[in-house]
Amino acid sequence: MHVDSLSASDPISLPMTPALLIDPRDNLVVALRDLSPGEAVEVAGEEVTIVGASTAKHKLPRHDLQRG
């Protein structure tokens, strides 16, 4: 189906990403569904491994945080 042939009532199927990076300058991503420890998800072309259980709508660090 071509985009020009869509109407407002047509359902659109998009791949569901498990997490969303709002700002590429930021280290935070937002979980869009519940995520399990050890789960690897792709965010903005980068693989992120979930360390602890997280529920949808929570913010998670994209990279390890440094102490101090």
Image: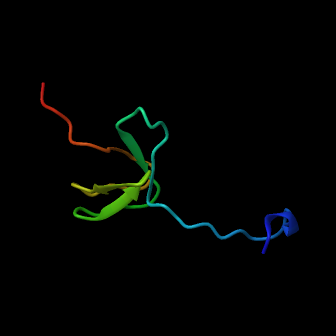
**Is residue 35 shown to the viewer in this render?**
no
Residue 66 falls in which quadrant of the image?
top left
Instruction: Tell whether 11 sits left or right of 52.
Output: right
Q: Is residue 5 left or right of residue 48?
A: right
Spot occupied by residue 33 in the image (x, y as percentages of width and height) = 44, 60
Vertical position of residue 44 compared to residue 11: above or below: above
Left or right of 67? Residue 28 is right
Residue 53 visible to an observer of this rendering: yes
Name the residue rendered at 47%, 56% in the picture: 32
Q: Residue at (39%, 47%) from the top-left corner?
A: 58
Q: Which quarter of the picture shows residue 37?
A: bottom left
Q: Residue at x 12, y 30 (%)?
A: 67
Dividing the picture into quarters, in which one does residue 42 lie? bottom left
52 on left or right of 27: left
Tell how many labels: 0
Q: Residue at x 34, y 37 (%)?
A: 27
**Residue 19 sits above or below residue 26 on the image:** below
Q: Residue furthest left?
A: 67
- Colour option used: rainbow
State which quarter of the image contains the C terminus: top left
Residue 49, percent across and down? Answer: 26, 57
Q: Position of residue 25 (x, y in %)?
A: 42, 32
Q: Quadrant of the N terminus?
A: bottom right
Residue sitting farthest toward the top? 68
Q: Residue furthest bottom?
A: 1
